[in-house]
Image (cartoon, rainbow, N blue to C red):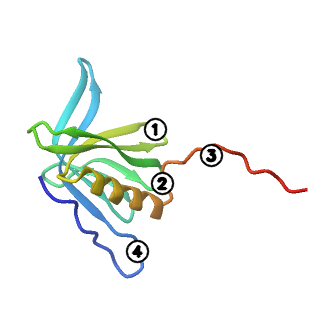
């Protein structure tokens, strides 16, 4: 389990983040399946899911990402603390368990990354603005 990572950014680009020890939650023939030992990378071109050998499992360019957010605190398969992270694309929603000792800190990092890239969850307005006559 690692702390919330520090951003890595160039002078004029948004920060990039890498989360290791990630579990992909997906549906299989027998129901929900957990695919362990992955990395989730929020980079300049998009969100990548990598195997331990560095090969890409799921590339998601930012143009295809419609929403990204940390949802529920959870427990990882090894019993440590984690956060469920959802990345929605135009095709489907991907759910991950990201190990972190600080779910709220990770949620803040994800929210900041989503806002910078225009992928933050939309907030519903409770009241309509009135037009002035």
Which of the numbered marks, if any, corresponds to residue 14? none
Discs 4/3, front: 3
Mark 3 or mark 1: which comes first in sequence? 1
Extreme-top residue of the structure: 30
Extreme-bottom residue of the structure: 11
Q: Name the residue under label 4.
A: 13
Q: Are marks 4 and 2 in contact (CB under 8 Å)?
A: no
Discs 3/2, front: 3
Q: Mark 1 points at which residue?
A: 91
Q: Is mark 2 on a helix, strand or loop?
A: loop
Give the quarter of the figure containing the C terminus: bottom right
Mark 3 or mark 2: which comes first in sequence? 2
The Cα atoms of the two marked residues, 3 and 1, are separated by: 27 Å
Residue 86 x/y as whole percent? 36, 43
The Cα atoms of the two marked residues, 2 and 1, are separated by: 15 Å
Mark 4 or mark 1: which comes first in sequence? 4
- 72 to 56, vertically: above or below: above
Answer left or right for 63 relative to 132. Answer: left
The Cα atoms of the two marked residues, 4 and 2, are separated by: 16 Å
Q: Residues within 10 Å of mark 3 (few under 14, many from 20)?
A: few
Q: Name the residue under label 2.
A: 119
Q: Is mark 3 on a helix, strand or loop?
A: loop
What number of labels is visible? Answer: 4
Residue at (29% x, 26% y) in the render: 27
Q: Is mark 1 on a helix, strand or loop?
A: loop
Q: Which residue is nearer to you in this view: 83 or 96?
A: 83
């Amino acid at each position: 389990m690692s702390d919330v990572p520090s951003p890595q950014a160039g002078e004029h680009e948004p920060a990039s983040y890498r989360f290791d020890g990630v579990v992909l939650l997906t549906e299989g023939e027998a129901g929900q399946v957990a695919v362990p030992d992955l990395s989730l990378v929020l980079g300049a071109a998009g969100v990548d899911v990598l195997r331990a050998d560095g090969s890409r499992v799921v590339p998601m360019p930012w143009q295809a990402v419609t929403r990204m957010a940390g949802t529920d605190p959870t427990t990882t398969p090894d019993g440590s603390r984690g956060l469920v992270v959802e990345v929605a694309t135009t095709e489907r929603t991907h759910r991950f368990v990201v190990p972190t000792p600080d779910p709220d800190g990770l949620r803040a990092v994800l929210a900041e990354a989503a806002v910078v890239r225009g992928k933050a969850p939309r907030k519903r307005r409770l009241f309509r603005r009135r037009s002035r006559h």
